Amino acid sequence: MKRITRFDNQGRGIAFDDKKTLFIANALPGEEVEYRIIHENSKISEAISTKIASPNPHRVQPKCPYYNICGGCNIMHMSAELQQEFKKEKVANILKKFADIDWNIRLITSGHQLFYRNKITLKVRNGKWGYFESLSHQFCGISTCLIATNDINNDLKYKEFISLNNGEVVIRSNSNHEVLMSVTTEDDIKIDYNSIPENIIGIVGNSKTLYGKNYFIETIDRYRFKVSYDAFFQVNNYGLKMIFEILANNVRGINLLDLYCGVGVLGISLKDNFQNIVGIEITENAVIDAVENAKMNDVKAKYYAGDTGEILKSLEMNFDTILVDPPRSGLNRLTIDTIINLNPDNIAYVSCDPMTLARDLKILKEYYEPIKIYAIDLFPNTYHVETVVILKRKVDEESTIEYERSFIPKR
Ligand SMILES: C[S@@+](CC[C@H](N)C(=O)[O-])C[C@H]1O[C@@H](n2cnc3c(N)ncnc32)[C@H](O)[C@@H]1O
């Protein structure tokens, strides 16, 4: 038996052996647990609890029949309140430890703990559809996913019209209850076209449209977005609305630079706050969508397809605000330096990984002061958390004159 002292960043319980730190899945602070080791080296052991004595009062019975088997959710054994407490502390601890930013984090929640995900990726193995088990990486067939939207779940009878032995299937739904599927496989894809349910609006196989369309239209608030099968779109529409609100209330000016813009969603949602939008995105289909989305939403915007760092090198324009929403890996040093050299008044950093956010803020905060930090529970029942940080350009303390755009030398 070991006593759990606190959480790690993945919501696992931490305990100590003589010489090792134990990271125990499904174990909460205050609990005494028995455990089974899954992986270990000379310093740490990763384990899963097998028996819990004195359960934490916030422990709940997970609703999902595949919990602890499938790798999707990892903190469903915590009450919603404990999940939120864990995420607040996680963001606060990471920002303090890695960026030396001391902040009393508030977590914004939508109240939708289940059925929120508009996209899932299923593996197909020997004709069975499912996920990989989180710890053993064994395949686990599933017939329901409680965090996916009802529309995705209703259609988990996909096998009735698609016959596939091995591969991967991405299933997405929109708020109009339409479902778009994209299959990647080395096998033949056999489709029974007569049995496809009405709400399946498209099936893409190895990037070719096999049925219907290769995109869907999503409506969020008063905005409409075309989203191609391979373009990024936030997986939680409730959370996306909260991000829209935070940005709309905090950034304003004439020119907005929307980096890692996907199909243009965040920039377009700021159309009342800026006159011109420039976006950069690496996925070509997403850029094509962004151009259409700007037209559809009556927004003056220009989009560039390619790597942010590369395109930024030749961008000659002044921006009041630079919005960045990079993948989990965050920004690289060159991109951060270029952003600082562009010298915007504000930077809005939207992040899905507090670790890389903290790493980048440590550099940015030499020139930019974080003035607002919001943590958003975009991924309930998983240890992931979204963070939005609003940064304002610092005033030159010696001269008490604000930095002019040309003051910061090109590096
Ligand atoms: C977290 S998503 C954000 C998308 C968009 N802001 C949204 O909210 O829908 C990150 C985006 O960055 C794009 N991306 C990844 N690496 C990139 C790079 N080096 N340069 C430009 N875009 C990149 C991805 O294709 C993806 O669309």
Image: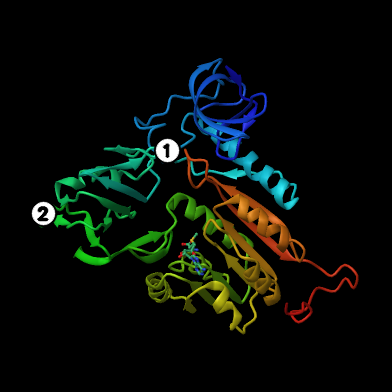
Task: Identify the residue at the far top of this view.
Answer: 53
Horizontal and vertical percent position of residue 383: 52, 41
Q: List x then y, in percent, for residue 111.
A: 48, 40
**Ligand 1 near label 2 (Cβ, under 8 Å)?**
no
Dot 2 amino acid type = Asp
Quadrant of the drawing holding the N terminus: top right
User: At 72% from the left edge and 52% from the top edge, which residue is drawn?
Assistant: 99
Above or below, 271 relative to 158:
below
Indicate which disc residue 192 carries. 2
Given residues 395 and 247, the one toward you in this image is 395
Mark 1 in CB contact with mark 2 (< 8 angstroms): no
Q: Which residue is mark 1?
A: 134
Q: Earlier in the sequence, mark 1 or mark 2?
A: 1
Badge 1 amino acid: Ser
Classify residue 353 as left or right of residue 73: right
Which residue is at a point 65% across and 80% down the rendered structure image? 318
The CA span between labels 1 and 2 is 33 Å
Disc 2 residue crowd, few under 14, some 14–19, many 20+, Cα 10 Å: few
Does 389 sit above or below residue 61? below
Q: Could you tell me how many numbered marks the image carries?
A: 2
